Amino acid sequence: MGSTGGGRVCAAVDIGSNSIKLRVGCCAAGGVQVLLDTTEVVRLGGCLRDGAIPEETMGNAVRVVSEMVGRARRMGAEPCLVGTMALRVAANAHEFLSLVHRRTGLEVRILSGEEEASYSWKGASADFARNGGDLVLFDTGGGSTEFVFGRRGAVERIQSVPVGAVSLTERFFAEDPPPKLALDEAMACVREALSANGIARAHPGTAPAVLGLGGGAVAIGSVKDGSATFIPTRLHGMMLTRKDVAEQVELYASLPLAERRRIAGLPASRADIVLGSACIILGAMRALDVECFTLSINGLRHGVLLEMCEGPRSDGE
């Protein structure tokens, strides 16, 4: 870790199934001041169907990670690298890890689904702690969706569900636009996956506060915002209703990809998988029996930064 006039600088690189994300922050009293937040879509999750990361995709991902590490180092931080679903299941993940180490000198820590969810909780719940009440967090990724159930500020249960925006899109939405039958089958798949993993209200009769994380949730918030410029920080804390999400499911399902890319607020890199994200989020809201959720842009990598800031200083700092 480096330092600025205000404190140590730390960085986290989140190597996900859909995108690779870098966040650099300065350790401050009670939290982290974000200095840089950037995302690049790589689609490592494209390996999930065939079992291995394609050579071209792997090379691109290694390049992106190397560039992000270099960027973090120029800002004075030695980054922590973490990987999620795609690296948990890819048959040749070890090759990717070896290439990253060769290029950067750093090891990638592959998180379990439970560890992934725990970091997301740490990153998001600090802003939205609900003393005495139930709090549920969901984080939609490319290959899986993580859920954390908490009460009175403490985690009660963590669950990783193996359904994500990329995997759902590849399985059901090959046609452009998808037929109604494909949409119905995708929603049924989400419902069954959530049910099989026990996603429901932890305490029946008590409506939990719900936090939504992940690029899909942020994209849905941005479309509701309707701005021509995508500014994630402006969306932090936005409330989204089940009606908002259901309407966007219908919107995306009705349009071919070329028209989806022209929707105000929707990042072009998300246009092909946003329907999958919206289906998962709608399914989660139905399973939890809630009418709204609050959007957070502080998830896994923010949780990693918080942990780094809480840790002991290295010698010489």
Image (cartoon, helix red, strand yellow):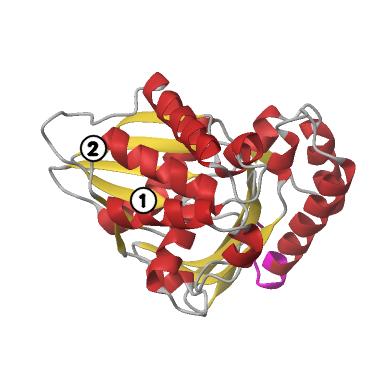
**C-alpha span from label 2 to label 1:** 14 Å
Q: Position of residue 119 (x, y in %)?
A: 46, 44
Q: Nearer the viewer, residue 205 or 85?
A: 205
Q: Residue furthest top?
A: 196
Quadrant of the drawing holding the C terminus: bottom right
Q: From this view, report whether residue 301 is shown above or below residue 170.
A: below
In the structure shown, which secondary structural element does the residue marked by tag 1 occupy? helix
Residue bearing mark 2: 289
Q: Nearer the viewer, mark 2 or mark 1?
A: 1
Q: Position of residue 35 (x, y in %)?
A: 53, 73
Q: From this view, report whether residue 270 is shown above or below residue 86.
A: below
Residue 28 visible in the current orientation: no
Quadrant of the drawing holding the N terminus: bottom right
Q: Residue at 89% across / 42% down in the picture?
A: 55
Q: Is residue 315 magenta?
A: no
Q: Is residue 52 left or right of residue 237?
A: right
Q: Is residue 91 left or right of residue 157?
A: right
Segment colored magenta: 72-80
Q: Residue at 66% across / 64% down in the picture?
A: 258
In the structure shown, which secondary structural element does the residue marked by tag 2 occupy? loop
Q: Nearer the viewer, residue 261 or 154?
A: 261
- Amino acid carrying label 1: it is Ala
Residue 148 visible in the current orientation: yes
The numbered dot on residue 52 is none
Q: Residue at 33% across / 58% down in the picture?
A: 244
Q: Residues within 10 Å of mark 2 (few under 14, many from 20)?
A: some
Q: Residues within 10 Å of mark 1 (few under 14, many from 20)?
A: some
The numbered dot on residue 246 is 1
Quarter assignment of residue 82: top right
Quarter assignment of residue 314: bottom right
